[in-house]
Amino acid sequence: MSRGRDEIILNVFAYIMIGVIAAGCVIPFLMVLMGSLQSEDSVLRNGFSLIPEQLDFTAYRYVFDSPAAILRAYGVSIFITGAGTLISLYFSSMAAYVLARKDVKYRNALAFYLFFTTLFNGGLVPYYLMIKNYLKIDNSFTILLLSGMFNVIYILIIRTYIAGSVPDSISESAKIDGANDFKIFMSIVLPLLKPVLAAIGLFIALGYWNDWYTSLLFVTNDKIIPLQYLLYKILTFARFSQQILSQNAAVAVIDLPGETLKLALTIVATGPIIFLYPFVQKHFVAGLTIGAVKG
């Protein structure tokens, strides 16, 4: 069938709008990339531009001054992000399944108890003392995993999805066939949660990847420092060096990367996510759309 004029106009308008939105997303990243490849002097004199006057890798040389530390931090971040996301999704979905079961006697009270923790908390000092003095899990992968493992909002979202998309008749039929609660969750409920787990998992993974504050509080062992905290330390040291040199007038401060260093750190931190996302996107979209059509 030949397309009508209205459909052609609509498609052209849609492509133009998508192109404008895509340019609005890509151009800022290109500005950051090109800015990181300029000299500090060029950025301070001319500002940021898509076409650098001259390529300068000083900022990247400063970042990768110790490549072994960067690679080790990459490995730590990848492990924490992957393992933390899987563990968090598993236990969060299990908790949500319990809260969604109508035969659980105090499920509403438990849900309120979890939600109450999002409104009030004990504060930073009790949290630090509990981790440092009582649990004694500082300087370990355990604290890096536990810090972002549970998010009450995500649990409540999964619970709402289970209540609205997983019929109780499925669990009842499985119980009649002799399946216990754990078997029902693992074999029936968990596979049906792929859409919501795909969406929640992306946000959990980004939270783990960008977490540097937990390492700042509890990690002093350089061997388990994640990437974000290592980059934070590099930036802090660069700022401190600039202040010392500016006070002593030992060298020109402009010789040290400042603005370009921030841009280079941004590229180093977000580069893996950007290159990985095209390969993950199809699985993410499939996870969101699976089960949308009922047969």
Image: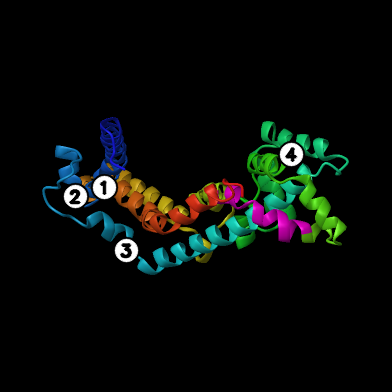
Residue at mark 3 to residue at mark 4: CA–CA distance = 45 Å
Q: Which residue is denoted by mark 2 in the rendering?
A: 38
Q: Which is nearer the N-term, disc 4 or disc 1?
A: 4
Q: Nearer the viewer, mark 3 or mark 4?
A: 4
| Residue range of the region highlighted in magenta in the rendering | 184-198
**Residue 219 in picture, x, y percent from top left:** 56, 57
Mark 1 residue crowding within 10 angstroms, few (<14) / some (14–19) / many (20+): many
**Residue 53 in picture, x, y percent from top left:** 11, 48
- Please say whether residue 187 is one of the residues in the magenta stretch: yes
What residue is shown at x 66% (from left), y 44% (from top)? 158
What amino acid is found at the position of numbered circle 1 in the picture?
A: Thr
Q: Which is nearer the N-term, disc 1 or disc 2?
A: 2
Q: Secondary structure at mark 4?
A: helix
- Please say whether residue 3 is one of the residues in the magenta stretch: no
Q: Which residue is denoted by mark 1 in the rendering?
A: 260
Asked if disc 1 and disc 2 are in contact, CB closer than 8 Å, the reply is yes
Q: Which is nearer the N-term, disc 3 or disc 4?
A: 3
Q: Secondary structure at mark 3?
A: loop
| Left or right, residue 108 beside residue 275 | right
Q: Secondary structure at mark 1?
A: helix
Asked if disc 2 and disc 3 are in contact, CB closer than 8 Å, the reply is no
Q: Which residue is denoted by mark 3 in the rendering?
A: 65
Q: Which is nearer the N-term, disc 3 or disc 1?
A: 3
Q: Which residue is denoted by mark 4 in the rendering?
A: 114
What amino acid is found at the position of numbered circle 2 in the picture?
A: Gln
Q: Quadrant of residue 292?
A: top right
Mark 2 residue crowding within 10 angstroms, few (<14) / some (14–19) / many (20+): many
Residue at mark 2 to residue at mark 3: CA–CA distance = 18 Å
